Image (tube, grey):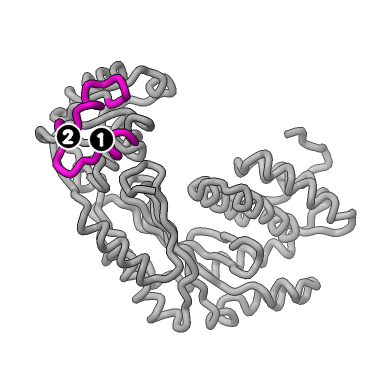
Amino acid sequence: MLSCHDNFEATFDNYPSMLSYHQALSMASSWRRCKVKDLHVEPLDSASPLYGHPAAFAAGTSEDAIKDTAANLGLALNVDGNIYPVRSTAYKTLTERAKINGTALPKLSRKDLANVLNACLSVHNSDALLLIRNEKVSAVHSGDETDYSVLPMDELLVTLEKKLGERFPGFVFESGYTDHAYTCGSWILPDQKEGILGAYAKALAAHGQAAMANRLVPGIRFMTSDTGVASAKVSALLIGAQQPIHIGDCIGVDHRNQRKIADFDTEMDKLFAKFCDSVAKLQSLLEIPLEYPVNAMTRVCKKLSLPKKEALEAIAMYEMAYGGGPATAHDVFMAMQEIPYMMKTCHTPEAKLLKAEENMARALSIRWSDYDVAKELKW
């Protein structure tokens, strides 16, 4: 898979390779500021004159990048006299600069869509900040320095590892992933199990779930994006089940208001306390009894917008295993973990999987009594 392709993705099994990749990516990427009204969109589908004229594009643009764009977004962007293919990741920010949106826009022919975008872009005197990466325009952010702040991914990774070493000695890199939308990585904190999970493990044992307590170790997931998909954030994980259990975002730095790497460094100092807060919320679910756990699980899954197919399968599995008797919100939350596991085994795109896990973590903060009702929900 070529890095210029919109569906490019890569995985990493060690930190040095992940860091090296992102250092090279930062070096090869270009951030350019210009006036929104000076941007000009061109159609780039197979019927476009540009499609068969690769010499019209900026130096270094390959035929592979042109053909891939024609098969995906089908647009090109003229920036200061240089024409670049536009990656699918840039569509949202491009329409934001034009200040238009709507479900009808993607249905237009590429020529009509380009005309609409150009008409709207031409009336705005604001600045745009473009990310040109792997031969294409990957994002068209606001150029106002208070609206978008560049936080280089390689520098974030270096800061993250430094802070983990200071506060969580013995940490272990587990895995990394990147595509054109975002980058994420996970680390295990085996030496912090007692400090972070000690009270929770004792509570699990008291509820007859010592085996689960023995399996789980704390971990973190780092995620960031240069294309407007996510802030630079670190989330709390419990690792040891069939799929990591996301129990909430701990810290985050938005790409706004002139935020810098130093701000991420400062936020990392709060990680231990925030992680413990997330574990405490999870532990509190052990003390929330449910009279109608299957109904509660159904309502919570629907409320959190979890994927219906996998959610209904997980609910059916829990209903068979439950068999009546006492149950807690913790039981249901753990049963819900089948959902991301099924998504993973079905090779669901990583972005959808991460979104589902983040949504599930919101279950730690809901009022479960609102969903524990006798009436069955038809979903």
Q: Which mark, by number, is residue 161? A: none
Contact? badges 1 and 2 (CB < 8 Å):
yes
Q: Residue at x 10, y 35 (%)?
A: 80
Q: Camera-side residue: 47 or 288?
A: 47
Q: Residue lying farthest left?
A: 81
Q: Quadrant of the C terminus?
A: top right
Which image quarter: residue 120? top left
On the image, the x and y values in percent for residue 88 come to 36, 36
Verify whether residue 46 appears in magenta.
yes
Q: Residues within 10 Å of mark 2 (few under 14, many from 20)?
A: many
Give the numbered dot on residue 85.
1
Could you tell which of marks 1 and 2 lies nearer the N-terminus? 2
- Of residue 339 and residue 230, the one placed in the foreground of this image is 339
Give yes or no for residue 51 being in the magenta stretch.
Answer: yes
Q: Amino acid at mark 1?
A: Pro
Left or right side of 65 for 238: right
The answer to whether 142 is drawn above or below residue 206 in the figure is above
Residue topped by disc 2: 57
Does residue 53 appear to the left or right of 202 in the view shown?
Answer: left
Residue in the image at 63% along x and 79% along y: 198
Q: Secondary structure at mark 1?
A: strand
